């Protein structure tokens, strides 16, 4: 079976490195983008199974990215997880309203990530 | 990539974040308080918090959490940006920097109780009670625990509109029969498939947990022509093994929230009656869902122009510094090899062919680009100055305004790193000794607040950094008196120029006792500052105007790896004189040379007399008397002894050279700064001009006699 392919979007290099490490350890294939704008442009011509995005980013934040992706035919039903340290209900409702499929609360471990990805990967 | 590497990235990033936050707060202080600025500050602290949590740095994570809470309020506009607030945030940032340093150095976390309490207080004053658990100044509360609390609360919330009874009931049943199977009812409603959710995956997960589907309710399933694929028509009842905890199942439905009805235990066996929803716009979700699908096919066209044709993001890649240095060393060797090839061909009479010129052009190009890899903007050093000035303001009571120019000027990473210490010392000195007390300043008709000017620019292949204050200037009488008292200057010598007196502050032993204050008196004198700068291949000079202020000017090389040098012939040896020292070269006539004492001769350059230093003594050659008129004099500028004239036999060439340390390959030799390999493959010594001239001026007779 083809490994699940994931795009991670985070402006923090250490977070990208952590995600890359944790996800590849779990057998996922990983692509990375540094902010919402870069991710959106990349996704215009590329396919992934799941998108994992940070919320606070320069240029285009995570919610903005999701809103834009949901308006495209290609990614309208794409599973998208948001990374959040802000685990308040209000933030999660906002994530769901913005079109997120689910969330991963930081700090995360490889196990937690993999569970979340498998829960949404079609 | 392992954990250590990732942590190293994290610390780099912390540094960037701290600088971004500081720049943002400085902008706030200067009056720029737009959302972009505030957001950048928030993001910087948020990013550190994220990494701290990921790496398990609890004190750092806990501190950033409190810090971020307040910044969140500022971002929301619930806390106004006042000057007091910005000052407090700057203090909080200083403390954050200490936190990061402590984590990086593996030392104990700084005492942050006071500032944390202030941040928490400011946050709580907003009056929204929801987040007080996190904001409470409880240093012991680990951030992970805080997040888990929130998560639990969230899970409870997601269990359904009436979660508490269901959960407690479930637990009651659990305690009654330990491994008893229990029932679960799952009914995805319209909207459960929004946002890319796939209910099938949840059912699969239930099966993986050992659940068995005992019933599928298809009672509301319409005819195929009425079927809306985005609507939820089916409901399932599962029997879950007693060993499976309810929380684990609830977790599966975490993301879907209210859009999937999940019932546990007894409730699951009596689900609410379901009605056909075919013509049921009463539920708010379905129309929204259909609307979304209806527009999907048409939206792409509209969405296409959305990706703003913003400037393409600068892409970057992180490279291990060691690898980069290897490359740059390699390029240095390439430069030498190219020179050797050119020389060999020239010896064979083949110097002028096109390919060689092309190669030379390419090598120079590659070299310049390789050098640029190591270049960094000096802003990374300058940006630490505001904090320093704040600390100095607290300890000295002198408030100093900072004016910065040219912070985008780039120079070598190593130079930048090693610049920080001398720069800090010079700034401390400027504030401590240069800038007067507010009272004195007012008396002198100046603004009570002093001004420190920092500027950097690239000029003639060097980087010139200027640290200027608008203080009283150097008190030359006092300096001279102290230098005499300390035995640095011969009391008989009264005709020192202003410049020479200013330079006395660099003399070893001059500044240590004078700086009794806690600010500058850190055991390092100005002589160490000059030594630091010299080790970087740079020079430091003073421009002081009484009553108006003092400028320290640092001239630094663009890179440390490769320098420009003048290759000279002395006897049968080639020597290299670093070009940074060379002022001019000339062939002396007899009348321009005057004897002084027994062995010293001076060169008259346009009325100024410079001591002549025969380089032959360095190479163990014969008497300097020989070949004076046939020789060439190279006038050099030195750190401590002004100008001098080096006597050589001939000037051969001027070219770039790679410095090889004699210490590592042979041993340290006085008067020799290192060695390099020439184009012809021979080794040439690089002259330590400062040392050589200094030795001569200290022991003029001995030096001359030894020659």
Image (cartoon, rainbow, N blue to C red):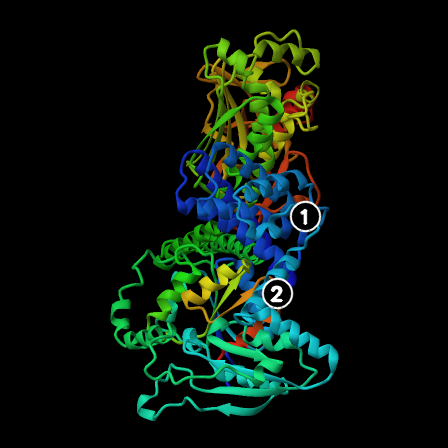
Which of the 4 quarters of the picture holds residue B137?
top right
Above or below: residue B82 compared with residue B693: below
**Which residue occupies the foreground of this view, B29 or B398?**
B29
User: In percent of the image, x 64 and y 9: which residue is there?
Assistant: B481
Which label is found at residue B152?
A: 2
Q: Could you tell me which chain the residue with mark 2 belongs to?
A: B
Which label is found at residue B138?
A: 1
**Which residue occupies the foreground of this view, B665 or B437?**
B437
Quadrant of the image containing the C terminus of chain B: top right
Above or below: residue B73 compared with residue A19: above
Q: Residues within 10 Å of mark 2 (few under 14, many from 20)?
A: some
User: In percent of the image, x 58 and y 37: which residue is there?
Assistant: B91
Whether residue B626 can be seen here: no
Same subunit under labels 1 and 2?
yes
Quadrant of the image containing the N terminus of chain B: bottom right
Above or below: residue B673 compared with residue B285: above
**Which residue occupies the foreground of this view, B446 or A61?**
A61
Relative image position of residue B260 (x, y in whole percent): 49, 77
Relative image position of residue B414 (x, y in whole percent): 56, 45
Question: CB of mark 1 within 8 Å of CB of mark 2?
Answer: no
Q: What separation in Å lies between label 1 and label 2 (alpha carbons)?
A: 20 Å
Q: Could you tell me which chain the residue with mark 1 belongs to?
A: B
Relative image position of residue B103 (x, y in whole percent): 67, 50
């Amino acid at each position: 079976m083809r490994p699940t392919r994931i795009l991670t979007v985070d402006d923090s290099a250490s977070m990208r490195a952590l995600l890359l490490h944790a996800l590849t350890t779990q057998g996922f294939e990983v692509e990375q983008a540094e902010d919402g704008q870069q991710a959106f442009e990349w996704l215009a011509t590329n396919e992934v199974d799941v998108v994992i995005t940070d919320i606070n980013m320069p240029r285009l934040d995570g919610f903005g990215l999701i809103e834009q992706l949901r308006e495209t035919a290609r990614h309208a039903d794409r599973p998208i997880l948001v990374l959040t340290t802000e685990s308040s209900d209000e933030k999660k409702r906002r994530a769901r309203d913005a079109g997120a499929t689910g969330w991963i609360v930081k700090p995360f471990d490889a196990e937690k990530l993999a569970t979340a990805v498998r829960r949404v990967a079609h | 990539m392992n954990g250590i590497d990732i942590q190293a990235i994290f610390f780099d990033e912390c540094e960037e974040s701290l600088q971004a936050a500081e720049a943002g707060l400085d902008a706030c202080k200067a009056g720029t308080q737009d959302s972009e600025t505030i957001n950048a500050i928030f993001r910087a602290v948020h990013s550190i918090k994220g990494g701290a949590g990921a790496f398990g740095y609890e004190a750092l994570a806990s501190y950033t959490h409190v810090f971020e809470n307040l910044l969140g309020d500022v971002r929301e506009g619930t806390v106004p940006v006042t000057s007091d607030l910005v000052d407090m945030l700057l203090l909080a940032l200083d403390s954050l920097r200490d936190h990061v340093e402590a984590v990086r150095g593996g030392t104990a976390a700084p005492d942050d109780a006071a500032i944390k309490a202030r941040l928490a207080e400011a946050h709580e004053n907003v009056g929204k009670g929801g987040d007080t658990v996190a904001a409470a100044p409880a240093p012991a509360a680990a951030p992970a625990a805080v997040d888990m609390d929130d998560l639990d609360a969230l899970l409870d919330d997601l269990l359904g509109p009436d979660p508490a009874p269901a959960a407690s009931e479930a637990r009651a049943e659990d305690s009654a029969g330990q491994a008893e199977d229990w029932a679960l009812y799952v009914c995805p409603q319209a909207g459960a498939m929004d946002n890319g959710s796939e209910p099938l995956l949840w059912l699969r997960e239930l099966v993986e947990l050992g659940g068995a589907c005992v019933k599928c309710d298809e009672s509301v399933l319409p005819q195929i022509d009425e079927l809306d694929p985005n609507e939820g028509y089916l409901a399932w009842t599962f029997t879950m093994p007693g060993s499976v905890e309810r929380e684990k199942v609830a977790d599966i439905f975490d993301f879907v929230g209210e859009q999937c009805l999940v019932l546990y235990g007894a409730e699951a066996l009596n689900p609410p009656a379901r009605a056909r929803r075919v013509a049921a716009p009463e539920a708010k979700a379905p129309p929204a869902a259909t609307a979304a699908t209806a527009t999907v096919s048409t939206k792409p066209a509209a969405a296409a122009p959305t990706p703003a044709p913003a400037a393409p993001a600068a892409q970057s890649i992180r490279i291990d510094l060691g690898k980069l240095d290897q490359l740059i060393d390699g390029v240095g060797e390439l430069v030498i090899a190219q020179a050797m090839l050119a020389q060999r061909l020239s010896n064979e009479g083949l110097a002028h062919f096109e390919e060689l010129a092309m190669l030379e052009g390419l090598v120079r190009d590659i070299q310049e680009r390789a050098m640029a890899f190591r270049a960094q903007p000096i802003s990374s050093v300058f940006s630490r100055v505001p904090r320093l000035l704040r600390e100095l303001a607290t300890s000295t009571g002198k408030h100093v305004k900072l004016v910065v120019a040219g912070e985008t000027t780039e120079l070598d990473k190593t130079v930048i790193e090693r610049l920080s210490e001398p720069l800090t010392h010079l700034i401390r000195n400027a504030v401590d000794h240069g800038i007067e007390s507010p009272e004195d300043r007012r008396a002198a008709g100046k603004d009570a607040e002093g001004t420190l000017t920092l500027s950097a620019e690239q000029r003639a292949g060097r980087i010139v950094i200027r640290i200027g204050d608008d203080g009283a200037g150097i008190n030359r009488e006092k300096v001279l008196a102290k230098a005499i008292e300390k035995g640095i200057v011969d009391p008989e010598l009264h005709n020192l120029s202003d410049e020479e007196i200013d330079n006395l502050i660099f003399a070893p032993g001059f500044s240590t006792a004078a700086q009794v204050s806690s600010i500058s008196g850190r055991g390092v004198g100005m002589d160490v500052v000059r030594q630091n700068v010299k080790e970087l291949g740079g020079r430091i000079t003073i421009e002081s105007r009484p009553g108006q202020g003092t400028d320290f000017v640092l001239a630094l090389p663009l890179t440390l790896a490769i320098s420009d040098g003048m290759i000279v012939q002395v006897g049968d040896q080639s020597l290299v004189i670093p070009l940074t020292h060379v002022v001019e070269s000339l062939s002396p006539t007899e009348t321009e040379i005057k004897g002084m004492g027994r062995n010293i001769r001076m060169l008259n350059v346009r009325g100024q007399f410079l001591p002549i230093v025969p380089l032959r003594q360095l190479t163990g050659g014969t008497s300097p008397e020989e070949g004076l008129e046939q020789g060439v004099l190279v006038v050099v500028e030195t750190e401590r002894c002004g100008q001098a004239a080096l006597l050589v036999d001939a000037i051969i060439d001027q070219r770039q050279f790679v410095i090889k340390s004699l210490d590592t390959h042979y041993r340290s030799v006085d008067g020799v700064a290192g060695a390099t390999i020439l184009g012809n493959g021979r080794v040439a010594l690089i002259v330590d001009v400062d040392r050589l001239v200094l030795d001569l001026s200290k022991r003029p007779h001995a030096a001359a006699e030894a020659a």
